[in-house]
Image: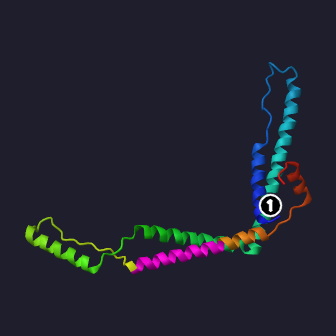
Amino acid sequence: MNLRKAKQIQDKISETTHALHFPERKVDAMTVESWQSECLHRLKEFDDTMTESVELSRVEYNIRKLQGEANAKSGINKILTDLAFINRKISILQNLLDDMVKQEPKEVVFKRVELKTAEMQKADRSFGFEPVVKVSIFTEDYIKEKEAELRQLKKERVKLDDKLLDLNISTTIELDEADMDLLVKYDII
């Protein structure tokens, strides 16, 4: 089975394990005449269900182990690491771009400085008045460069996603007959 199918089977095993029905854990000795016999019956049923749950979990984790080995051999682990790093870079860059304010043209800044200077001279305020004209450090060219970098990173991510999908479909693992029989028994495959 390919790795994509293996992941689906793991999910089904997990669902099946969680859906297993355990018997009631107590017997009412007031209403059940042969309560000792009923307790033994339920204990056996409980133990059998627990054994099945453990066996299904064993197969699930066996698949996980085989998947891990296949991921390492096929290069999937490297791709996943590269994808995680690209996603982190995209996130950082996107967050920074969202907060960047484009620097105003120099003519606008000079005009703002001129107006602030005139205001200071006219108001004759020296105490508590701070002449400030703040200018963003982010030039239009810088922002465009970072936007282009972001687009390139997203293209790289798409390529890696495609490569990962191809590997998940083309890389296979094999289960032994006993594991396959258990999955068939529970209609998982």
Estimate the x, y position of residue 183 in percent, counting from the top left. 85, 53
Q: Residue at x 82, y 56 (%)?
A: 59
Q: Residue at x 60, y 69 (%)?
A: 84
Estimate the x, y position of residue 108 in percent, counting from the top left. 25, 76
User: In the figure, residue 47 lies in which quadrant?
Assistant: top right
Q: Quadrant where the C terminus lies?
A: bottom right
> Horizontally, is 76 left or right of 175 in the view?
left
- Bounds of the magenta span? 141-160
Q: Residue at x 82, y 43 (%)?
A: 50
Which of the two residues, 57 or 147, is positioned nearer the viewer here?
A: 147
Look at the image and tell me whether residue 77 can be seen. Answer: no
Estimate the x, y position of residue 135 in percent, counting from the top left. 29, 74
Q: Quadrant where the N terminus lies?
A: bottom right
Estimate the x, y position of residue 166 in percent, counting from the top left. 73, 71
Q: Which residue is mark 1?
A: 63
Q: Is residue 131 above or below residue 44?
A: below
- Whether the magenta-drawn stretch holds residue 9 is answered as no
Look at the image and tell me whether residue 105 can be seen. Answer: yes
